[in-house]
């Protein structure tokens, strides 16, 4: 199989989109739905002839293109945008089955489907489709009469049978399930309308129809694989449909004007659109991940990955289509608009290839395996991630060798976040010294500082190896994560040489001086003043909600140094000492009982002009660099911190004997959230490796993890019962780890820009809505 690189994938997508627009566009779909105008078989023949769609997943040695199921996903997504009912999904089901059926009959039939000479449909019994039992009188039975096979029975709700030349029928045989080919002409096929006028389903009746066996071995696992692939394919198609809905909604809110302004500039509309992107992109990650597994790349458990993709896409497609109707107002509710077709497709998808309870049960069984047993600890690492990360072998080997030598000295690996009131222990300080000696701090800094000058992909690899080894790789606070990016982007060489080594050594420990009591995060209207006096700046004002200020000895401050300049100008970004410099830090107690942030009063604090980064009056630009500091290095491994907290909850519930079936089902939702983080991280890594900027995924990341964290904390408190609200018997307001998740996670929805502001940024910077 040839895995397509980004350029090849883009070429396939453009080719498919052009051909679909010409032959199977939304206009063609509407003509078919509204006027029964169009020949589906003829459109499919032309489309398949032009693009060789049925050849895409088939290995080259068997007459195909050898591009894999991931490339099939590109086609399914494009077809999902227009909803024209060509029988590609049913053809792919047949191809999936035939490629695994190693018999002469299967080998003979496969080329006819690859060439397009025969159009197939797969006829499942109800049990194969993921329902517990076939209904009365439903299903197929095959008998062998001295080498002549006959099939009889009835199966409802078959995809694509009305357009098929050959049926691949799953039937009960003399020795168990068997798959046979039957000429479609030997069947009685009756199409039944559904809510979705673009995808009817067919009832298939066979009465002693001649058949040819396609399988020789027991086929239960094969049928389960094909059904799981069908779920993954449907999820991929749904991503295309939802993307089309969002595109329509965005175009409408950009153009539609009320009160003299585009409605897309209204904050409520921006937030609605941002939330749709927040659901769409993780669903895309899940669908891509399932098709990657279908290609056999990293994980044999297609059923679990397909279940994840199906559950997420069903929910997402329904919501995106309905909210797109809402964003259009009354126009969206009309038959004329195509949005109703997507809503109907989304609803019908929910009952195909396994309904939500069946797929959730698959995921619930995964959760059940996380319970600690006497045989050993919980396994944190998904082998798909480890196997997918075969890149940078020399760097990864260096990390592993160093960890084998030094890892025993590491402090325990914590949860997803440090406590807001975190204070470094002597053990942690010694570990940071060891990391500094090994050059595992400040990985992206230039090598002249004794660092490694790693890019985002290399940084991801290091973070993954540390996390997989169960070893923390802490950062040096805001000095590393916020101040250093600003200095590297806007500071002079002299400033870099002056300040960065002191951050690296731990001499300088920074807190932020941005938000103010009156302006909040409206930095353009801050009131803190900076007056230039000779070769220094004297700063007077107040800052609020400054995390970690009680442990810092330096502050990076935004102050207005030109009172006559427009709001976004005349602001400077200044680094200043805290001790003995007219700065008073007043810790504020948080809802968790700790003192994690502070009110900071600057009463004539002085900083040299050499500590003004980017020059006087350019602080807004520098601040934007700070606020947008790159997080991609953590994205591929951040899910493991949340997984550790999740596993801690599972372990606690097991100890409390509260892990019944209902609880496991409740735990399925956070498990889904963790897997979506994992798959989003994989996409970020793939995009960066291809030289792309994964803007959408990074933009939605902060909202998604912070909302997830709050929901995990609430669920933990509820599922633990009284154990979740009883605090440890210690002096003061002491919390256990899961209680801390609950009471600190609301603050994380506010930190780094509230989630409401983040939605504005997504809407404006990613979706292109007007300010």
Image: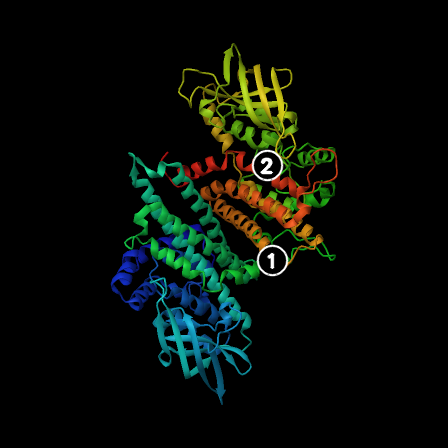
Q: Earlier along the polypeptide chain: callout 1 or callout 2?
A: 2
Q: Is residue 67 visible?
A: no
Q: Residues within 10 Å of mark 1 (few under 14, many from 20)?
A: few
Q: Residue furthest bottom?
A: 146
Q: Residue at x 36, y 51 (%)?
A: 244
Name the residue beneath numbered marker 1.
Answer: 662
Does 703 sit left or right of 474 as displayed?
Answer: left
Q: Nearer the viewer, residue 539 or 95?
A: 539
* Residue 604 at x, y percent in the picture: 56, 13
Above or below, comparing residue 596 to residue 457 in the picture: above
Q: What is the CA distance from the residue labelled 1 to the residue labelled 2?
A: 45 Å
Name the residue at 65% across, 25% down.
507
Q: State the SS at label 2.
A: loop
Q: Nearer the viewer, residue 601 or 507?
A: 601
**Residue 542 drawn above or below residue 65:** above
Give how far across and how far down residue 55 sits, in percent: 40, 65
Q: Quadrant of residue 49?
A: bottom left
Residue 311 to residue 527: above or below:
below
- Above or below 72: residue 430: above
Dividing the picture into quadrants, the one containing residue 4 is bottom left
Which residue lies most toward the front here? 722
The quadrant of the picture occupied by the C terminus is top left
Residue at point 28%, 34% (across, down):
260
Please provide percent x and percent y for residue 463: 60, 43
Mark number, residue 443: 2
Of tags 1 and 2, the one toward the viewer is 1
- Closer-to-camera residue (125/655): 655
- Asked if disc 1 and disc 2 are in contact, CB closer than 8 Å, the reply is no
In the rendering, at what x and y percent does residue 255 appear?
30, 41
Q: Is residue 160 left or right of residue 221?
A: left
- In what element is the residue under mark 1? helix
Is residue 327 among the parts visible in the rendering?
Answer: yes
């Amino acid at each position: 199989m040839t895995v397509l690189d980004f350029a090849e994938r883009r070429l396939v997508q453009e080719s498919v989109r052009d051909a679909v627009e010409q032959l199977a566009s939304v206009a063609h779909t509407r003509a078919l739905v509204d006027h029964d105008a169009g020949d589906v078989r003829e459109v499919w023949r032309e489309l398949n002839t032009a693009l060789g769609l049925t050849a895409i997943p088939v290995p080259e040695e068997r007459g195909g293109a050898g591009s894999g199921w991931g490339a099939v996903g590109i086609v399914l997504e494009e077809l999902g945008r227009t909803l024209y009912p060509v029988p590609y999904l049913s053809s792919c089901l047949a191809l999936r089955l035939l490629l695994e059926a190693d018999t002469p009959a299967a080998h003979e039939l496969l080329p006819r489907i690859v060439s397009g000479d025969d159009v197939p449909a797969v006829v499942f019994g109800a049990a194969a489709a993921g329902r517990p039992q076939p209904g009365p009188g439903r299903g197929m039975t095959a008998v062998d009469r001295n080498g002549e096979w006959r099939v009889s029975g009835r199966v409802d709700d078959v995809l694509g049978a009305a357009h098929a030349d050959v049926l691949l029928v799953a039937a009960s045989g003399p020795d168990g399930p068997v798959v046979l080919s039957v000429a479609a002409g030997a069947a009685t096929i009756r199409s039944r309308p559904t809510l979705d006028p673009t995808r009817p389903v067919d009832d298939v009746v066979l009465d002693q129809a001649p058949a040819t066996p396609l399988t020789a071995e027991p086929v239960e696992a094969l049928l389960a694989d094909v059904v799981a692939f069908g779920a993954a394919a449907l999820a991929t198609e749904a991503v295309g449909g939802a993307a089309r809905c969002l595109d329509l909604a965005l175009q409408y809110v950009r153009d539609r004007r009320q009160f003299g302004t585009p409605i897309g500039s209204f904050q409520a509309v921006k937030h609605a659109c941002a939330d749709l992107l927040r659901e769409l992109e993780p669903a895309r990650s899940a669908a891509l991940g399932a098709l990657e597994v279908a290609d056999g790349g990293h994980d044999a458990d297609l059923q679990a990955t397909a279940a994840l993709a199906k559950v997420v896409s069903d929910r997402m497609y329904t919501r995106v289509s309905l909210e797109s109707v809402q964003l259009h107002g009354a126009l969206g509710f009309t038959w004329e608009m195509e949005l109703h077709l997507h809503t109907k497709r989304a609803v019908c998808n929910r009952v195909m290839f396994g309904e939500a309870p069946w797929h959730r049960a698959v995921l619930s069984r995964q959760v059940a395996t996380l319970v600690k047993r006497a045989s050993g600890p919980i396994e944190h690492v998904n082998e798909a991630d480890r196997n997918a990360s075969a890149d940078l072998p020399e760097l990864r080997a260096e990390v592993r060798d160093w960890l084998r030598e030094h890892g025993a000295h590491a402090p325990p690996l914590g949860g997803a976040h440090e406590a807001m009131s975190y204070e470094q222990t002597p053990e942690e300080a010694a570990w940071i010294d060891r990391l500094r000696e090994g050059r595992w701090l400040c990985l992206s800094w230039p090598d002249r500082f004794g660092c490694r000058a790693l890019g985002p992909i290399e940084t991801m690899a290091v973070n993954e190896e540390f996390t997989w080894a169960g070893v923390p790789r802490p950062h040096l606070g805001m000095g590393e994560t916020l101040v250093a990016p600003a200095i590297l982007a806007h500071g002079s060489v002299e400033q870099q040489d002056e300040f960065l080594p002191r951050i690296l050594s731990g001499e300088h420990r920074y807190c932020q001086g941005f938000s103010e009591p009156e302006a909040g995060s409206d930095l353009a209207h801050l009131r803190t003043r900076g007056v230039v006096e000779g070769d220094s700046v004297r700063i007077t004002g107040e800052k609020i909600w400054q995390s970690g200020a009680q442990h810092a000895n330096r502050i990076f401050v935004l102050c207005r140094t030109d009172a006559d300049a427009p709001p976004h100008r005349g602001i400077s970004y200044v680094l200043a000492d805290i001790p003995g410099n007219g700065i008073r830090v007043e810790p504020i107690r948080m809802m968790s009982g700790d003192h994690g942030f502070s009110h900071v009063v600057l009463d004539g604090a002085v900083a040299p002009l050499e500590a003004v980064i980017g020059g006087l009056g350019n602080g807004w630009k520098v601040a934007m660099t700070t606020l947008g500091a790159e997080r991609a290095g953590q994205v591929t491994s951040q899910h493991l911190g949340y997984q550790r907290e999740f596993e801690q909850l599972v372990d606690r519930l097991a100890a409390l004997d509260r892990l019944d079936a209902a609880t496991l089902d409740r735990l399925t939702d956070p498990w889904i959230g963790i897997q979506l983080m994992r798959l989003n991280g994989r996409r970020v890594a793939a995009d960066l490796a291809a030289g792309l900027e994964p803007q959408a995924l990074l933009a939605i990341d902060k909202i998604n993890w912070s909302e997830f964290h709050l929901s995990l904390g609430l669920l933990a408190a509820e599922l633990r019962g009284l154990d979740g609200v009883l605090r440890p018997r210690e002096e003061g307001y002491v919390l256990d780890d899961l209680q801390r998740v609950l009471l600190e996670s609301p603050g994380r929805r506010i930190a780094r820009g509230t989630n409401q502001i983040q939605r504005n940024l997504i809407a404006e910077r990613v979706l292109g809505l007007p300010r």
